[in-house]
Amino acid sequence: MIRFSHISKRYPGGNDALKSISFHLERGSMNFLTGHSGAGKSSLLKLITHSILATRGEIIVNDQNVSRLKKRAIPRYRRNLGCVFQDHKLLYDRSVFDNVALPLIIAGNAHREVGKRVRAALDKVSLLDKEKAMPITLSGGQQQRVGIARAVVNSPAILLADEPTGNLDLKMSDDIMNLFYDFNQHDVTVLVATHDLRYLKDKSTHVLELDQGKIIKGGTSHED
């Protein structure tokens, strides 16, 4: 499903965010990405979403060579990805419904289909009764669930999350993480970047650990 082969990422100025790393995430697997601040976690996720390009190496996602995607193919590629962020990235002048509907509207879905799928996504995160609410009126955990509903409204094959529980208390963190486990049970490949060691102890999950741009657990790093 997701395969990195000898991937390096060097930013302008010579900063090596990732250093010749390789790993493979199986289809339908539950995965965690960990490491200290600056270890390369965000760069790794951005490479999967094609927000940045690798300096060297090959990335295969869902049988597609990400580095060779043509510009016109990128939007279609991203429809198979759901992304959840620590800061939600919600539009605070739009309702909960409108926030979740945004990916469907951009993709050109019919109005009737948008309503059906948005309400199904909100139901999955237990926020169906909040569709008319403005995000500012919701708790932090509820706002994060809106972000998750928006990420899964397209029924993506892959769900990526960058520190989704970083600003939440333990109870809310567990509620959010349980949603990811639930989506994984429905054959969604999940990759969550987190510092929370509690979730890394689950033996049924795969853990990728980065240190200074190299994988020290769950994959391999190669010396150039």
Image (cartoon, rainbow, N blue to C red):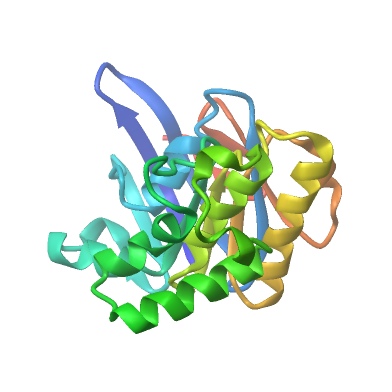
The quarter of the picture where residue 74 lies is bottom left
Residue drawn at 44 percent across, 34 percent down: 18
Residue 172, x across and y down, in percent: 76, 43
Q: Is residue 23 visible?
A: no
Q: Nearer the viewer, residue 193 or 55?
A: 193
Residue 131, x across and y down, in percent: 53, 61
Residue 65, x across and y down, in percent: 31, 65
**Measured along the vertical axis of the image, is residue 103 above or below residue 216?**
below
Q: Nearer the viewer, residue 74 or 91?
A: 91
Q: Is residue 75 left or right of residue 163?
A: left
Q: Is residue 44 left or right of residue 66?
A: right
The quarter of the picture where residue 27 lies is bottom right
Residue drawn at 44 percent across, 60 percent down: 100
Residue drawn at 42 percent across, 48 percent down: 6
Q: Nearer the viewer, residue 20 or 17?
A: 17
**Measured along the vertical axis of the image, is residue 9 above or below residue 187?**
above
